[in-house]
Image (cartoon, coloured by chain):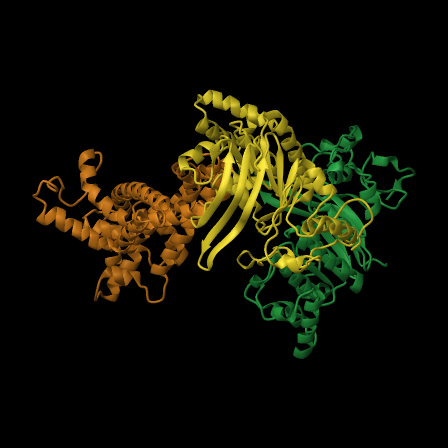
Amino acid sequence: MLSAIIRRLIHMIAVLFGISVLVFLIFFATPGANPAARIAGRNASPQTIARVERQFGLNKPLPVQYGLMMKKLFITQNLTSFVNLGEKVVPQVFRAAPITLSLVTGAAVIWIGFSVVIGLLAAAFRDTVIDRLLMILSLIGISMPVFWVATMANLITQGRFHHTWLFSWVPPLGYVPFSTSPLGWFKALIIPWFTLAILYIGLYARVLRAALIETMQEDYIRTARAKGLSERQVLIHHALRSAMIGIVTLFGLDFGALVGGGALLTEVVFGLQGIGYLTYQALETLDLPMILATVIYASVFVVMSNALVDILYAVIDPRARQAR
Amino acid sequence: MSDPQALLSVRDLSVSFRTRGGVIRAVDSVSFDVLPQQIFGIVGESGSGKSLTILSILNLIGDPNVIIAGSIRFGDQELVGAPASVMRGVRGNKIAMIFQDPMTALTPVHTIGAQIIEQIRQHRPVSASVAHQRMLDLLDAVGIPDPRQTFRRYPHELSGGQRQRAVIAMALSCDPALLLADEPTTALDVTVQAQILDLIRALRVKFGSSIILITHNLGVVAEVADRVAVMYSGRIIEQANTADLFADPLHPYSWGLLGSMPVLDGPRQRLAAIPGLPPALDNRPPGCAFAPRCRFVRAGCEIAPPPLRAGPHNVACIIDDHERASLRSERLTP
Amino acid sequence: MSNLLEVRDLTKHYTSRHGFAGKRVVRAVNGVSLDIAPGEALGLVGESGCGKSTLGRCIARLYTVTGGSVTFDGVDITRLGGRALRPIRAGLQMIFQDPYASLNPRRRVGEIIAEPLHVHHRGNQASMTARVASLLSDVGLGPDALSRFPHEFSGGQRQRIGIARALALDPKLIIADEPVSALDVSVQAQIVNLLADLQRDRGLAYLFIAHDLGVVRQIADRVAVMYLGGIVEIGPVASVFGNPAHPYTRALLDAVPVADPALTHRDRIRLAGDPPNPANPPSGCAFHPRCAAASDICRAVKPVRRVLDDGREVACHHPLAAQVDTQQA
């Protein structure tokens, strides 16, 4: 067990190292990239650029620059932004992370719950009207762009119908920390949660339905029927767990990507200053230290959610406990 | 015609499938009786309809396009067309099933103990601890070593033979009157197969169940069955007590099957293989389905399927007994 | 040197990762020696996991060999690879169990059978076409099969196609790995007869791997019985099957169900338990935990193969039927 965890950790560090080198090289070593000129601003004199180069250590050899950057990022944590001079990058990431985590985790709970119910219903009523209706609904959910859904939700709940009894509880856009007010946190996030979840509900429900229908062809399903179990028992006790294996793989990828900044559009429209929002701003101003920090943060989450998937595998599938 | 003592009485059973090209009949007018504590063997090659025959007893074919017609009487209960709730009360309770491949027949994500307890509690209103004890007793009865440890294992952690023992324990959990065994030893090694056949024989005595055993292996039937039906292309072509069938097989297909089986003693002879292939189900000849492969085919064979002759030794063949005796001596010298 | 194939001390080890338990060495084949004379059929029997398929694939050099040597037609092919192996392959062909999986579903049967001819540059287009047609008729298929796809054939016919492909280069040895075990009894008999005819007519040698002892008896001249990676008994079929010397051979024969109800209740050796795990083999004789005759020496010392006076070899400290005057092999 311990050796598996250590192996996993070494693997994770290797991935992070690779990603950080790649991002660093893209921004600092691709031909034409001139970070000093970018920091100094437009029409800066050569003297200014030279001063900036010295100040930020950009005249040193690349490996040294990389080392300095990593030292500032991880050890002293005093890497400062190139744009808002003096602003430290790492605390900003730490401020944004809980917002994104709150948003994505809540949405994930919703999308897993809803998609399992829809997938089960569709599989149980396979090829009937109920199945077709659910599949059309989920296709609609997949097709609706998230920024459009978010804007519509805002228009309805913040605008025209805000003063009706139905939506008067909706707080203004923005984030309320859980520590400040759990209820406020919940109210502020409930609409963003559903908005973000809609796409994944549709996607996961369809994948789960297909996986369930495939699992229902297995020999052990026939055994379960031969035992005298009802169709519902067969579906839930014998088919669902095997069918969830595919869902878990998807979930690991999606969750990691969203926490790493993929929830950008939802965050922007709902005024949630999370990681996606931060990355978006950094990219707009080409703020290299900030980009580096958010990308590395994101990759930590992707790698971590992969590890989480492996653990979930072992929980769901006893065969994976041995193989891994 | 049905034996009043029969536990299970199948009459004119047919299993058909609606397809785009019309209705295909995979099992055609099958009739047989299973007596209490009898082991009834059904032998046939793939596509002969033997699996569909026993799956239809429990309505387990699981294809929405299947049509089951005829009569399957179990005790005083008619199973063809019985409502789903009635079938659930029969399945696993009064009639239980053992499948071919124990690896795929057990749900991979539950321990074998949990799967057995699930079946007990489905049909018996017993407490968890009583069900647990019953499960341990069953594992012990089928010869699983150390049940108190083994019940915690998942199917993939057991050997093939142990898995099949667990499947059998599960099938026995509600003391079924009838066990349906679909090629129960085909996926197993020969030494393990011998163990499982011994077990099946012993269980008939210990649990008093009747058993329908389906196999393609004539040796397996000879070892355990009391009575045998030979199926070909959806029909029973010969049915007799095991000793009679092997001592005096009457149908040319039975001769061919026996001649195709390599033996381990006696001089080595070329196998008397049957030429050709069984007909496709949607393209069965109008007469005897075996006629195109039969060495002794004659004009009458191709008109209508020959009826199954009544009596203790049934055969569906128009060759008369006198001639058959001379043909048989011919078959012995290929 | 009259042997077509000589295998000496062949060993094949796998390393399997076992999760948290770390690496484990699985001794799939453990020091196997055997010979096949030209035109001779050697049967190789044993239960699943005994290493018989792995042995076959090592000899055909589909797998790399961990230790020992394989000499085919006077050439040591143990370490040959890639291009150097190609001329060897012409003389040593394989037939597989699953005719469905071993034929490319997108190629026509004519192309499938002609492919080895193309690879080895045998003849021109016209001679190849004629050769393919004659191969098809040799295995009992009509010329209409040429332009059809594998899925249009039944299992037995597909196995015939596989055999035709294996015969295309006139091999001296065919390694047949469970060639009939996926087939129905009546079709199995057709293929067994075909393989027997081909051996007689073409002077082929076989390494015939099967778990079905009856099928092996029908084809093989000699037979080797494998248990847990090693050969426990090898010799002429008549003596090994008729009068087994190794308790495992006896148990294997006794386990075969006989299609004669009069014989079912005869005196038999019944094996308990399952074959052991090749990753964790027992000490001494691998068979001792299941053997009724096991003694202290069986638990401690691995038996060497020795020659009995009827020429067969057995690896057992207490061979059955007490053949006298045994000598070290």
Q: Quadrant of residue C291?
A: top right
Residue for point 50% across, 54% down: B24
In the rendered image, residue A66, in percent from the top left (x then y), is placed at 38, 54
Residue for point 22% across, 47% down: A273
Colour-to-chain, orange = A
In the rendered image, residue C180, in percent from the top left (x then y), is placed at 67, 53
Direction from residue C212 to residue B232 in the image, left or right: left
Which is more toward the observer, C318 or C196? C196
Which is more toward the observer, B60 or A281? B60
In the rendered image, residue B282, in percent from the top left (x then y), is placed at 53, 58
Direction from residue A56 to residue C282 in the image, left or right: right
Q: Answer whether residue C149 is visible to the viewer in this image.
A: yes
Direction from residue B86 to residue B168 in the image, left or right: right
The hue used for chain C is green
Quarter of the image where the N terminus of chain B is located = top right
- Establish if A267 lies above or below B120: below
Direction from residue B38 to residue C43 in the image, left or right: right
- Establish if B239 lies above or below C89: above
Which is more toward the observer, A58 or B293? B293
- Establish if B107 lies above or below C107: above
Which residue extends farthest right? C325
In the rendered image, residue A318, in percent from the top left (x then y), is placed at 49, 37
Q: Quadrant of residue A248?
A: top left
Which is more toward the observer, C117 or B69? B69
Residue for point 75% across, 49% down: B322
Colour-to-chain, yellow = B
Quarter of the image where the C terminus of chain B is located = bottom right
Q: Answer whether residue C259 is visible to the viewer in this image.
A: no
